[in-house]
């Protein structure tokens, strides 16, 4: 079955809501906004965190899964991302001031370090399982950022992560027959267009305007990264586009079949 689980569906951490993280399989996650609570002990088995960008809502639980399950880890945690993203994690986050530099700390029962870094190449397909692949592609945010295409058994879901433009996302959807499912961010209500522009996020109005240029129809569209404060307002707004597009708003813990 081609399935991913949404560990955190929202654009920030709130009371009873988790932020960006996607469970691909028992060893791989995309982003680390919400790992510790939904995965519990299974966090220690995560081997690779594939990052979209360096913002806190996408990286924060790297700190806590390393710390809480340090003694249980048998393998290094591989942090993968664009060159700029990894630089930011090393210099601004796991830097011995905000949190320990785990790349200089050995695992308890091994000579390997607790964290290793690996730069990824956009548009390169990485094999991560029997018939599972990940491919990053560049997106448009306030810092260097990428979305991901997850392929299982020749079918794919494309996850935009944080972005203002959808050009590269739509290009991939239209050029690849295997993509029938889109997970796309939408952060603020349409009345906050200026804030969306300044922070390089989408509103429902911007999102559906941009999706109109997509040639492929019949795509399943899942929305994530809504700021919880605006959830009810945005639910009503997004409902207006229902019919023209097949849209669903994601919740924490939900699974997507593709
Ligand atoms: Zn974000
Ligand atoms: Zn961001």
Image: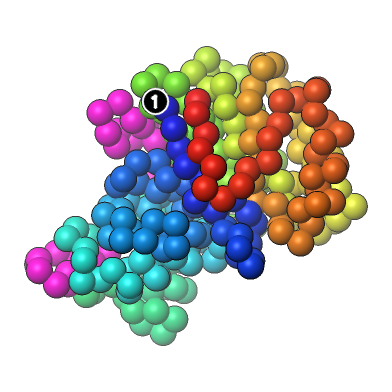
In the displayed structure image, the side of residue 111 where residue 113 appears, left or right = right
Picture coordinates of residue 243, whole percent (x, y): 80, 23
Picture coordinates of residue 26, whole percent (x, y): 31, 45
Task: Give me the residue at 64% from left, 22% from top.
Answer: 219
In the displayed structure image, the side of residue 134 where residue 11 appears, left or right = right
Placement of 242 over or under 59, stated as above or below? above
Q: Which residues are magenta?
A: 106-135
Task: Give me the residue at 59% from left, 40% from top.
Answer: 160
Placement of 137 over or under 145, stated as above or below? above
Is the C-beta of the residue carrying label 1 under 8 Å from the nearest atom of ligand 1?
A: no
Nearer the observer, 245 or 38? 38
Residue 183 visible? The answer is: yes
Q: Is residue 111 magenta?
A: yes
In the displayed structure image, the side of residue 12 where residue 153 appears, left or right = left
Placement of 10 over or under 222, stated as above or below? below
Placement of 134 over or under 83, stated as above or below? above
Residue at the disc numbered 1: 1
10 Å crowding of disc 1: few (<14), some (14-19), many (20+): few
Q: Is residue 47 magenta?
A: no
Q: Quadrant of the N terminus?
A: top left
Task: Give me the residue at 60% from left, 63% from top.
Answer: 16
Picture coordinates of residue 52, whole percent (x, y): 50, 50
Picture coordinates of residue 112, whole percent (x, y): 14, 64
Task: Give me the residue at 56% from left, 50% from top.
Answer: 252
Question: Residue placed farthest to the right in the image?
Answer: 191
Nearer the observer, 257 or 56? 257
> Quick one: SS at disc 1?
loop
Nearer the observer, 108 or 104? 108
Residue 141 visible? The answer is: no
């Amino acid at each position: 079955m081609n399935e991913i689980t949404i560990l955190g569906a929202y654009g920030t951490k709130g009371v009873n809501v988790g932020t960006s993280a996607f469970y691909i399989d028992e060893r791989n996650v995309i982003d680390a906004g919400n790992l510790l609570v939904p995965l519990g002990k299974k966090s220690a088995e995560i081997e690779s965190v594939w990052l979209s960008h360096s913002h806190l809502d996408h990286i924060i639980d790297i700190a806590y899964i390393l710390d809480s399950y340090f003694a249980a880890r048998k393998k290094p945690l591989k942090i993968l991302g664009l060159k700029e993203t990894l630089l930011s994690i090393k210099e601004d986050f796991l830097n011995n001031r905000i949190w320990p530099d785990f790349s200089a700390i050995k695992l308890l029962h091994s000579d390997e370090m607790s964290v290793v870094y690996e730069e990824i190449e956009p548009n390169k397909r990485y094999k991560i399982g029997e018939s599972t692949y990940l491919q990053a592609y560049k997106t448009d945010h306030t810092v260097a950022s990428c979305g991901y295409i997850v392929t299982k058994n020749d079918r794919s879901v494309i996850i935009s992560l944080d972005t203002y433009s959808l050009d590269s996302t739509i290009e991939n959807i239209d050029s690849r027959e295997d993509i029938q499912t889109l997970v796309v961010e939408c952060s603020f209500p349409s009345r906050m267009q200026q804030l969306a522009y300044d922070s390089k996020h989408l509103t429902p109005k911007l999102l559906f305007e941009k999706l109109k240029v997509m040639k492929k129809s019949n795509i399943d569209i899942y929305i994530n990264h809504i700021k919880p404060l605006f959830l009810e307002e945005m639910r009503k707004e997004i409902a207006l586009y229902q019919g023209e597009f097949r849209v669903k708003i994601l919740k924490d813990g939900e699974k997507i079949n593709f």
